[in-house]
Amino acid sequence: MAQARTLYDKVWDSHVVTNEAGAPAVLYIDLHLVHEVTSPQAFQGLRDRSLAVRRPDRTMATMDHSIPTRDQTLPILDPIAAKQVQQLRINCKEFGVPLADVGDESQGIVHVIGPELGLTRPGITVVCGDSHTSTHGAFGALAFGIGTTEVEHVLATQCLLQNRSKTCEVRFSGLPPAGIVAKDLILALIAEIGVGGGTGYVLEYTGEAIRSLSMEGRMTVCNMSIEGGARAGMIAPDDTTYGYLADKPTSPRGAAWEAAVNRWRQLPSDEGAAYDRTVTVGASNLEPMITWGTNPGMGVRVSEPVPRPNGNTAVRKALEYMQLEPGKPLVGQPVDVVFIGSCTNSRITDLRQAAGLLEGRKVNPRVRMLVVPGSERVRAQAEAEGLSDVFRSAGADWREAGCSMCIAMNGDQLDSGQYCVSTSNRNFEGRQGKGGRTFLASPLTAAASAIEGAVADPRLYL
């Protein structure tokens, strides 16, 4: 009788080219996503060694990090950003790599366009020179970020040296109450296990709460696996997955589709498969989550007070940077900026959540609110549904697709000392602007905070 295997085991085993004793495995890569920031040196390395891209048909490039989101028809003012964008055009043309350029209907944040084009599929391996590649694990793919040297290696060989990870099941038991969305689930987990709790593991998310999520919610959860220290996050494919992929531009059709779904149905972890570790989070009693400190593990329920240092140097330093009073709840803490966007929360479902709460209401006059869709397809759909009109009527700034304030690019950044409720994935010191102070939260909490002009509990507006 064959040994019961986990989802990770199955994907890993089917992609190992060779695995010599005492050495990393050679892992085949099905999909390589590329953007303008981490790829220039990799392409130059190919030139220097007179190498071609091994599988341009399994490579996809887009502009996302360095492009402006206000008016992409205008020249880019930041000279480094402009050079990165232009160099990606040159590299893709020279090496035959497909590119979703500015103005293309497929352009957008790399971890948004992969799924919406149907390039991300169950059971495949996905890499990108970006840490949040774990997003694609929502489809039952093994997806992780790589460095620029590894980008060059994959471009040249379509393979990568990798060590096998341990497995950890993260079971969300029960169903979340109203007002609790995917971002709250993953922030609750990271608050529990810490930013190093997943180190050495690939997390597989299971349980009723995960099954109840849309694919977009599942992507949010997997996106932030890296913030818990994990190598990747994965969710077994099911009918929700197949329904999402059925009409995507590059998805197989007809008999090929039926064959693909039959293969995908074999991927979920076998009954009795053993994980190296299991973590259980009760979803039915969760509240909206928000971070208070300077890493994503420094999070609390929105009704809870900010912790006291009690001799913990990291807590003390974070509170000093954030200029927060220990033991006092964040609700009511004034904010200057609200940002809805990033590869974590810029999909159509995220925008619908925020617009649903904002409709008929106004952004507090002391708050600057930016809403940045994750792709041109998301932007077009949001405009067709009237969501952009809701944002504009409320007083928010509706933008074009890109990474924007998540990484403080092209002027989309905080001033020193400003507080921001952000739907992005990192609240490190200076991440959204030098001296800026970030509270990570869901689109619902962000929208409620924009109305209040202070950190707010979104359940009061539902």
Image (cartoon, helix red, strand yellow):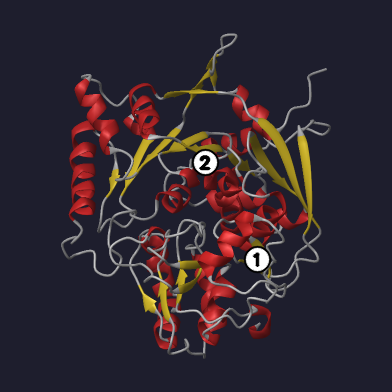
Q: Is residue 230 left or right of residue 437?
A: right
Q: Residue furthest top?
A: 21
Residue 171 relative to residue 117: left or right: right
Instruction: State left or right for residue 47 relative to residue 106.
Output: left
| Secondary structure of the residue carrying numbered label 1 | loop
Position of residue 163 measured from the top left corner of the image (x, y, whole percent): 57, 23
- Closer to the camera, 257 or 454? 454
Q: Earlier in the sequence, mark 1 or mark 2?
A: 1
Which amino acid, mark 1? Val
Residue 439 visible, this angle:
no
Residue 190 appears in the picture as rendered: yes
Residue visible at 41% across and 87% down in the picture: 393
Percent across and percent down for residue 346 are 47, 63
How far apart are the two marked residues, 1 and 2, measured between alpha carbons? Answer: 35 Å
Pointer 1: what residue? 181
Residue tagged 2: 254
Which residue is at the far front?
A: 311
Residue 55 figure quarter = top left
Q: Nearer the viewer, residue 263 or 114?
A: 114
- Report the side of 63 relative to 432 (left or right): left
Where 118 falls versus 330 (above or below)? above
Marking on residue 272: none
**Quadrant the N terminus occupies:** top right
Corner quadrant of residue 432: bottom left
- Residue 244 horizontal/vertical position (percent): 56, 53
The residue drawn where x is 58% and y is 56% is: 296
